[in-house]
Amino acid sequence: MRMRRLLCQVMIAALFGLAASTVPSPWMIDGVTGSTFNLIADSGRVVTPDGSSLPFWGYGLASSGKPQYPGPTLIVNQGDTVTIQLTNRLAEEVSLMIPGVQMSSATAPVYPQGSRSQLTSLVPAASGGGGTRSYTFTASRPGTFYYQSGSNQKIQLRMGLFGAIVVRPTQNSTTKTIDIAAQRLNDPANPGVAAVSRSYTRFAYEDGDGSTGYDREFLFLVSEMDPNFQHWVEFDRPLGKPFDFSKWKANYWFINGRAAPDTMAMPNVPWLPSQPYNCMPLFHPAERVLLRFINMGQDFHPFHTHGNHMLAVAEDGRLLSTNPGAAGADLAWEAFTVTLAPGKTIDALFQWTGRGLGWDFYDHGSEDMPAPYEPLDEHAMRKAFAVNTSPGNPPASGQSLPVIMPRPDEQTLGIHWSGSPFLGSNAELPVGEGGFNPFSGYFYMWHSHSERELTNNNIFPGGFLTMAGVVPWPMGWPNVPDNLDESDMYAPMAGM
Amino acid sequence: MRLTAPKALRIVLTAVTLLLGSAAAHAAVVDVKLRAVEGVTTMPDGRSVPFWGFSRYSTATLTASTLPGPTITVGNGDTVRFTIRNDLPVPVSIMVPGQLFTPPAKILDSTAAAGLPAKSRVRSFNAEVAPGQEIAAVATFASVKPGTYLYQSGTNPAVQVPMGLYGALVVTSGSAGQTYPAALGKAPSAFDHEAQPVLFGEILGRYDTSLTPPAYVTLNEEVTAAPTVPRSTVDYRPIYHLINGKAFPDGNDIDVPAAVAPATTSRSLLRLLNAGSRDVVPSILGNYFSIIAEDGNLLTYARQEHSPILPAGKTLDAILVRDTAKGFFPLFDRRLGIDNAGATLGGMMTFLGDTSCSPAKGDIVGSDGKITYTDVLALLRAYVDGGSVAAADVWPLDASGLPCGDGATTIMDVLLVLQKASGRNPY
Amino acid sequence: MRIRTFVAAAGLLGVLLPALPAAALVQFPYDLDNMPMGNFPGVEDVDWNADGLFDAPPAHYLFRHLGATDGYVKMADGLDMYIFGFLDLAGMPNADTMMMMNKGEFPAPTLEFKEGDHVYLNLSNLGMPVRPDLFDAHTVHFHGFPQAAPVFDGEPMASFGINMGSDLTYYYRIVEPGTYMYHCHVEATEHMEMGMLGNLVVRPAQDGSAVGGFTKFAYNDGDGTSGYDVEAILQFSEFDPAFHEADEKAQPLRFAELEGRYFLLNGRGYPDTVDAGAIANAGGDPTLKLHAIVEANQGQRILIRLSNLSVMGYATIEFGGLPAKVVGKCAKLLRGPDGKDLTYSANSVHIGPGQSYDVIINTTAVPRGTYFLYSRNLHHLHNDRMDRGGAMTEIRIN
């Protein structure tokens, strides 16, 4: 029941938020900006949808005084000198390390009182019980990175001491125009489709040619927990009891700190006080969506997007390019399932247009009329994408849909089904069905394809999944201000 | 593409090397005599673990086996002929995945554990050597191609490879300073320094709750106690995680030196191999790997990764590019195979970099793994006598806080080591 | 409301069917004679151009009919394992399809299409007689289908599943060649672990023309990069016998304890992977129909289409120690946006659930003999307690 309610909330919020077709919003991931960050490390509890409460250790903003899971996403600009001041409220020493980044602060590993056998931290640490340490680096390279503790990793990493770092490229102050109409994101030679130009001012990397330009970005910081381990740290470890690490086995999986269906709740909900971030991608057809993947767990996760392939443009914060800054992402590769390896980051672009489906998913029928919620400029783009018929392939005449649908009593309906197979349309549903698709969009499950990971400790569904929503371009909505930002998107939720 | 001077020079050198016909300069027949025999190794927690391993021997001297087996280095185009002397109670064979060989007629048997159907199944992928036998030239790999390879037993591999029957085979390119024969249109494989191979492995075990108190039992102990019993390894997990046969803190850091003026960059070749049954992610902090080859095949485009995936059985050749700044970079398994039977921090962890800047410096007396007042006294005595002790040359610290030293033993070195011994952490 | 068991007695559904309106069984357009699906793929009863007369189907129109039910398969160590599975109902009258209950196969029948095809895939949910308490819907998810729309994507939260005793038709316009896979997406963790998984291959338009010395290709490469002589389609998966037994006996399903103990290529563990015949279950039904033998003459190029639909994790598949060239990944030719060659050579691929690889082995210099393709995650080389089994098969070079 809770899942229905909160999904309904986010759907309505999205409905209003995406009404401003000229200013797509929100476009950026949640996080804190700046160049000096004051973080604390402390313990807390995470809530899972099956009602469990698991202990975690996490970073948090000193200004809030509370740890969060994952730690705050730090958003900086290329070229910034970034300082992270860490105050450690845990009992044991905690540190902060950033793979892929060269630090300007000291980096020597900590061997107190001895040699290899005495190693406690891979980098200088903040001592337990209030110790502090400052970490500095110059964000010379744009991209997706992460910070994590370098102390006693086998405990601290599993407890949750990690967070994301996003470095925005200098190129963001320029405009680049690219062709977004290729059916394959990486196949400009595919004939039959006229180019559709679109200008971008937001890029993932210094590509030089705009090939990493995007409309919206979403973070996928994935992690996992073995409840037996979390409870051992809380109760048994202080008593000196051992843990069989060979039997460590995840049974909770999190995207941005939440297990499904909480992934699809709103950000900053009061009933998930330590888990502020969500993961609910919503975008329009033809928009280029940047997915920033970070795997802070210890298992490989095969991330699968229903709906289309992804185009991977960077790995470990490095653009896949023969000549970064000039040649663009010319070594980019596509996949419908991307391996998220522990400690690795991947940046990928996703775009859905419906091109090539072979039937008119806007249900124009035989008339060339814009569908409801289809703006005229997007109508032209859709005609460029859709390939309904060609000589030699007789149409299923008189029908937009090439098959006859089963009767509703023959179907087990999904909650995101609008009642109609067409984008932007809905149909009457039996009482109690549906309700989680108020804008009659298309939903795709984006999930780990190790399907055991779609559970919350024996309960299906859950874990490592979310639903990405293709929202039809709105037309005829009430006017909304051009400066609609994320807080406005969720404003209607106040009091619900 | 702008040509910098070093790049231009490298291209010229590449062209010159090609003209000199580096590939398969003069292919030789290399006879490698390997002995398969049981050995014993010790883990950092003191546990003695038996293993089955290879050793290289001559007719006169039978050597003990090592974990992993010895690194075998041959040249591009050589024919490698293995002679195997089998001092194990089970048959063995040898495979080098990625190098061509002529397979024997299928070696099958139908032995199965009690209660299971006796179906005909392959026992060895390559020609076998029975227990107690020595067969010359039992396996031949002709015209080997350059790169980094694993050699491993091809008999009942699910048991014999985790037992330790593996090692690294390095095939040099024939061109000095080139991992592979230089080829235009491929990733550059030039290097200034070659580090020792980094071979990841495991010891499997299971937590036996029938014991009092419950404890880990290694696959190795059970197999050596009953070597011919048909055995499934589905219930075993890695409990020790090894780099070059050692679990941290045992083992050595890997020397990958910074550039020395007038050079501005140094390129160090790291051959990464995973002989284990589980995949590893060797993550480096403070630098990137430039992955140039996979399984002995030079890539067209090098991949820049700080956390490459090293699946079971795979080899990767990586170049670590450094400037003149000293560094000591952690390398660890990001899949968290970093414990020793769960008890302590250990496992697949080491450091790459200027080992002359290791924070472990100062332990100069009796490798006890700790810096104590005994070390301080010995250092003070050496200082007073006017000598120098490189292993305790910690002052001055480098910009990143590393005890790189200056080549001379001064009172500052003594003071810093004294601070270490008394529990403070000056480096 | 308690759902009554659909007993697999031949005449029962014949009694029930006429009670339902015929239109409920007609999924294709223009099936003007209102005959039950029994005439499928009886092409003479479809009017394609709406002229009131029956026509032969146009070129490139394909019809497939799958059933979803449960069944048993015999593992290599003799265990008769309860599964959920698909099976092929092509040409079978609807009155007879219910007889195929409890005859699910593993893996599901391989689907092969060609670029340019229009595919109508009919799915009949035959019910699961061993579990009369279950009334699960089923779907077909064409995994990796580009630019999918939810109605035909088979993911039930965003669309719907088809109930027991009913049919549903999917339409796919095939535009992208490559190696895909398909599976049921209803209660995915359970139905996939129970075996509703299959191979799916799309051949490129370039097939049939001579390019680079070949006439068969994995992709429209234009230069023969993905050309081959002999093809092998292999799917890796795992079974946990405790989970299957719990499902068979209506016990709680412990997803938390799922752990593979049988490691399979095309549904079988070695040595059954190299048994060229079908393998029957204890009831005598030949439900393991695919072997995993890879065979070629020396000098030929072998294309191995590899996919992984385990619900648990990755496998590192090594090609007998033979060097291989990876030319495709996840149904895309390894070629960059402006044409850069991203293919590479390796001894093995690290393949995760939901991924596919296209690997070419050039046997020109390879000595004749039998090599062994296997998962280099060596704990996969068992059939539960049986040593020397699991995810292993032969590559025979003649």
Image (cartoon, coloured by chain):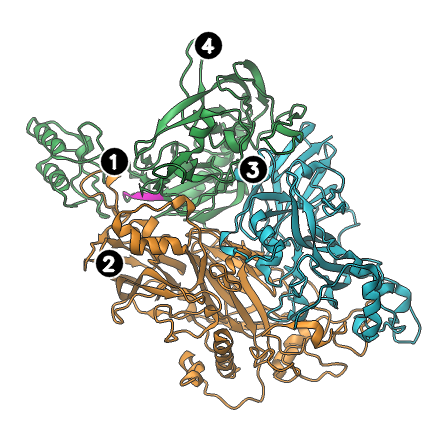
Chain colours: A orange, B green, C cyan
Q: Which residues are magenta?
A: B326-331
Amino acid residing under circle 1: Ser
Residue matched to label 1: B356
* Residue at numbered disc 4: B59
C76 lies left or right of B80: right
Residue under circle 2?
A90
Callout in the foreground (1, 4): 4
Give the structural element (helix, strand or loop) at label 3: loop
- In this rendering, the answer to whether A439 lies above or below C70 is below
Q: Nearer the viewer, mark 4 or mark 2?
A: 2
Residue corresponding to mark 3: C385
Q: Residues within 10 Å of mark 4 (few under 14, many from 20)?
A: few
Q: What is the chain letter for disc 1?
A: B
Dots 3 and 4: beta carbons under 8 Å? Answer: no
Label 1 vs label 2, nearer the camera: 2
Q: CA distance from mark 3 to mark 2?
A: 45 Å
Q: What is the tally of numbered marks visible in this picture? A: 4
Badge 1 and badge 4 in a common chain: yes
Q: Is residue A316 left or right of residue A392?
A: left
Coordinates of residue C274 in the picture (x, y in percent) = 70, 36
| Sequence-wise first label, 1 or 4 | 4
- Residue lying at the far bottom in this picture: please name it: A478
How packed is label 2: few (under 14 Cα within 10 Å), some, or many (20 or more)?
Answer: some
Quadrant for residue A145, please give it. bottom left
Q: Residue C300's spot in the image, x, y percent?
A: 73, 36
Q: Is residue A188 left or right of residue A30?
A: right
Q: Give the amino acid at mark 2.
A: Leu
Secondary structure of residue under mark 1: helix
